[in-house]
Image: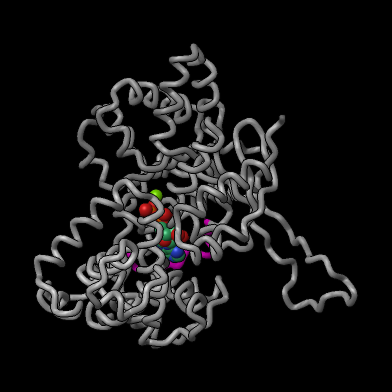
Amino acid sequence: MKASPEGIWNECLEQLQSRVPDQTFETWFKPIKPVGLDKEELTVQVPSHFFYEWIENHYKDLMSAVLKQVSGNGLKLAYSVVYSEDAGQPATSGSVSPDPGIVRRQQLESFLNDRYTFENFVEGDNNEFARAAAVAIAESPGGTSFNPLVIYGGVGLGKTHLAQAIGNKCLQDRNAKRVYTSSEKFTMEFINSIKNNKTTEFSEHYRNVDLLMVDDVQFFQKKESTQEQFFHTFNALYQAGKQIVLTSDRAPKELSGMEERLLSRFQAGLIADIQPPDLETRIAILQHKAQEDGIDISYDIIEFLAANITSNVRELEGALIRLLAFSSLSNTDITVDLAKRVLREIIGKSFSTSISIEDIQRTTGEIMGVGESEIIGKGRKKEVALARQIAMYLCREMTSSSLKTIGLHFGGRDHSTVVHACKVIEEKTQSDASLLQQLKSIRHKIEISQF
Ligand code: ADP
Ligand code: MG
């Protein structure tokens, strides 16, 4: 029988359902629709851009693992996002089928993502120079002395965004051939081309472009033959007056394990750094993102987030998304209090002050179908004992109570009983996937009930 997108996706869903808490499954996986399948990829449709990002950020590895298991080969996942055509338009009366909207394909990884534009790149003192150089190049690829343009800076500061914005802007010139790749992908393709005797095709592919963007060149470090190959590609393009854009997580002179001649090529053009954004820029970025995603959020909260998340823009975005997810899952408004909780999680402090041992006992009992009094009591029935051990384990994980205190809350048991319970649960969850899942749903429910 020929595989259908629905068939494959349904099998994936089964797998996913057993691996994530129900709520997560309902919220993030149920709404996904399989829409296409070819030899290389399964295309699924997701309801919004926000949705797509959330999945990519949180479940990418899980999804690929499941897809691999189900398809038995290297099937990739591609997304298409439904953009509603005009939310303000009244629906035609009598029409029952939902407007399919415009389906725009999100090209992932190796391709340009049209989300990254100059328009939605917020300018600040930290990135002003890199941005200006990028704009100049996009307007006249190969036509400035900024060749190559090397954009460098720490993680999550907007290097990829800028490189892709150049590529997207050049789209206006339809005939220009643009290639965006990462140095990792370049390396992989090069290795494959050697394996398959296709080095000529490989070189041609890269040498016949008008604009070459290579992201994260620090991955070329210590890969000598790839560097050699890249050096030739670089020269060919450079001599033909084609534009090259490179990004790196450190300054070119700090790239070790890189051939001198390549480094000197990198340094021959323009090197522009991006620094972490200052408070004002962080606020502006958050305001921009909130507006983009249609999130109604007060200035106080934005300022609070911006003041506390200082290192990188990806984390800022993450905080906003998390806040939105929590508020929609728990059906509450986004308040400063909620923001504090979310933040506490992001910057690594636990919930310990707000979650009580009783909360954990109650929720564990509910989900495991065991009464709260039984959890505290002396009963030795298998399911009661297991629920008790899980509750003890979670108390140790989620509260700051001492083992002694935890024991006391479980009918005056000794602290060594708690230690034993934690060990048992740790061991069991290593091998028992359904137990692990149960544990996850309990924890999730406890967290959610805090809001
Ligand atoms: P890098 O490649 O430097 O690790 P990215 O370009 O992937 O970082 O940026 C991380 C996230 O932060 C992206 O979603 C990007 O859109 C966003 N971002 C970074 N800088 C800005 C900015 N100045 N304005 C708007 N969004 C930004
Ligand atoms: Mg990047």
Q: Which residue: 43% across, 75% down?
A: 323
Residue 161 position within the rendered picture, expressed as x and y whole percent measured from the top left = 46, 54
Kindly identify the residue that appears in the image at 45 percent across and 62 percent down: 21
Q: Position of residue 345 (x, y in %)?
A: 30, 71
- Considering only vertical position in the picture, is 87 above or below 180? below
Tell me where residue 194 appears, x and y as whole percent: 44, 15
Q: Residue at x 41, y 44 (%)?
A: 146
Name above or below for residue 156 compared with residue 289.
Answer: above
Taking the image as drawn, is residue 131 in sight?
A: no
Q: Quadrant of the C terminus?
A: bottom left
Q: Which residue shows up at 58% across the image and 53% down it?
A: 114
- Percent across and percent down for residue 426 are 24, 55
Please give the count of numbered marks on the rendered protein: 0
Q: Which residues are magenta?
A: 116-127
Q: Main secondary structure of the magenta part?
A: loop
105 horizontally vs 278: left or right: right
Check if residue 5 falls in the magenta segment: no
Ligand 1: give its quadrant: bottom left
367 lies left or right of 414: right
